[in-house]
Image: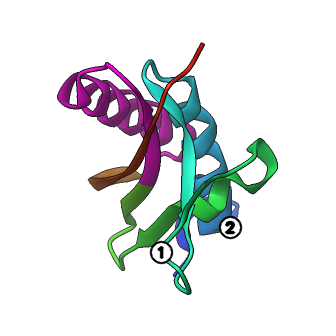
Amino acid sequence: MKGSMSTNLGIITIDPDVIAKYAGSVAVECFGIVGMAAVSMKDGLVKLLKKESITKGIHVSINEDNKITLDFHVIVAYGVSISAVTDNLISNVKYRVEEFSDMQVEKINIFIEGVRVID
């Protein structure tokens, strides 16, 4: 479902892919996040997504009240506090996506799909 809002000049509609791309770019800037992950349904392998494929690790749903739910599949850096990284991710994404879209983020679910050692 697409998010839409009425203005005095007409209706603005936002595609969920636009929100996913923006949310993903915010997420990969967060400390401790190595990147978005894709999990292969066939063999269960986790793959780190390149920047241009980042939206494959994010699912966006928008309900009829224009409230956004985001599911992130991420790979975190080895040695970081997962709770600190996810708290930071949630607060940054919530603030920036709400500011960007003028829509409320109702829920952010984070699935840690892997851990990577980074240099």
Relative horizontal placement of residue 97, taking residue 9 as reference (left or right): left
Q: Indicate the position of residue 76 as horizontal and vertical percent values.
A: 42, 34
- Could you say where residue 119 lies in the image, as x and y percent from the top left? 60, 13
| Residue that lies at the very extreme toward the top in this rendered image | 119
Q: Check whether the beta carbons of the residues at disc 2 and disc 1 lie within 8 A of each other.
A: no
Report the span colored magenta. 73-102
Mark linked to residue 44: 1
Give the CA distance from mark 2 to mark 1: 45 Å
Q: Nearer the viewer, residue 43 or 69?
A: 43
Q: Which amino acid, mark 2?
A: Gly
Residue 7 seen in the figure? no
Q: Residue at x 36, y 38 (%)?
A: 94
**Disc 1, SS:** loop
Going 56% across and 86% down the picture, which residue do you hit? 42
Foreground: 94 or 73? 73
Say which residue label 2 marks: 10
Residue 71 among those drawn in magenta? no
Image position of 76 with respect to 79: above or below: below
* Residue at image point 57% right, 32% down: 28
Q: Main secondary structure of the magenta part?
A: helix
